[in-house]
Image (cartoon, rainbow, N blue to C red):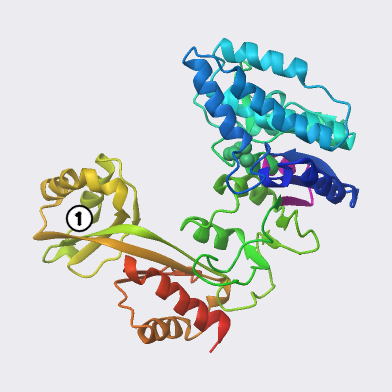
Amino acid sequence: MKKVVKFGGSSLASAEQFVKVGNIIRADKERSYVVPSAPGKRFPEDTKVTDMLYDCYGIAKAGKDFSAELAAIKARYQEIIDGLRMELSLDEEFQVIEKNFKEKAGHNYAASRGEYLNGIIMAAYLGYDFIDAAEVIFFQDNGEFDADLTNEVLAERLSHCQNAVIPGFYGAYADGRVKTFSRGGSDVTGSIVAKAVKADVYENWTDVSGFLVADPRIIDNPEVIEVITYRELRELAYMGAGVLHEDAIFPVRQQGIPINIRNTNAPEDEGTWIVGSTCQKSKYVITGIAGKKGFCAINIEKDKMNSEIGFGRKVLQSFEENGISFEHVPSGIDTMTVFVHQDEFMHKEQKVVAGIHRLANPDSIDIESDLALIAVVGRGMKSMRGTAGRLFSALAHANINVKMIDQGSSELNIIIGVANEDFETAIKAVYDIFVVTQL
Ligand code: ASP
């Protein structure tokens, strides 16, 4: 068995956290490849090293003195090194960083140093090889991740290493310039490494014991999801459940490698397993509930819309021309409604409406704002009679007016639209019926 283990920023924020991580890795010989993030927050008001680096570089770029900011970053690492009683000096590394900042090496380079330096400490602490991600993870000139080249080079390099630390979050262009993934991108690196070594599992260690069935800010102490499929997770991620970077599932998903979300502060917890498919039934009919406020519905009416070929395309073309992506398009015989993010739509609204008039010539258009969408997701809903009935009677009991319903033909999810102010009550009602009372 081979395991790739990725540790998030809060798992590596201090020497104390490093000790926990060291214990976790040493407890299992199969944990052979380690992907660290940069040190995160030690306490709620603390600043992540990545953010300190962005700030520091901003000052350097403006041609101002950044020595105090750089010293504060160095102190974060020194605190870890001292706390672990290690004999390691990062002096030379910091001299190089200072020089490169002065030469304006770029935001990407600056941010990547958080993971790079943490990787050096981690490798020394564990006695593992250190592999600079810039030598094994590649981006194309257009900024897209180069999956094929990366896999080839990384697989070959790691085939010579029994144990290695590969810092997360960054790679490089062909000319060696450093480029980062988007924020939280160490999750993606972990997945890429897992694919390259054909790992049996990709363990993603963070500060929660897995995905929760619902948002803990709305539901007190929600249950942890034990097993979730990639497809279910996509449906939930898309509605804003963010423990794992969205792009992290793609490399491992292709290879059928499961991801196990674990908690560094409670390593005995099993966490959540993210798998391709499973015969394991979820504990409840639904696997998870997620949602988002802040949508607008644009209602378009036209007599005999159903027989007008190309009507839908013309309407959507107006959104496309204005660079707006749509979330859902429920329709009736003479009506079509397009759900969009209110903040994206707001300042382009009149252009979009004019575009629809010009392109599709509808009878009327009206706009409803301040709507929320809630996704109720679960492989257990498939072929299960009465799920929708239970869902809507629960919402009716909670006095909630459902404005939109959309069930995918996969029977994996039901999306409902409600007013923003009903959002929390609706989620509570759904959680209650499917998880608490299971009526
Ligand atoms: N350190 C980076 C960030 O704060 C990447 C990561 O933690 O995954 O976004």
Report which quarter residue 198 is drawn in.
top right
Judge whether residue 132 can be spotted in this image. yes
Residue 222 in the image: above or below residue 435? above
Residue 331 part of the magenta segment: no
Q: Is residue 184 left or right of residue 84?
A: left
Ligand 1 position by quadrant: top right
Residue 290 in the image: above or below residue 44? below
Q: Is residue 64 left or right of residue 425?
A: right
Judge whether residue 173 can be spotted in this image. no
Q: Is residue 341 left or right of residue 107?
A: left
Specify the amino acid type for callout 1: Phe
Give the x, y percent position of residue 180. 58, 30
* Element assignment for label 1: helix
Of residue 369 and residue 202, the one placed in the foreground of this image is: 369
Residue at 51 percent of width and 77 percent of height: 431
Q: Which residues are magenta?
A: 191-204
Mark 1 = which residue?
311
Of residue 352 and residue 43, the one placed in the foreground of this image is: 43
Give the x, y percent position of residue 141. 52, 22
**Extreme residue toward the bottom, this view:** 439
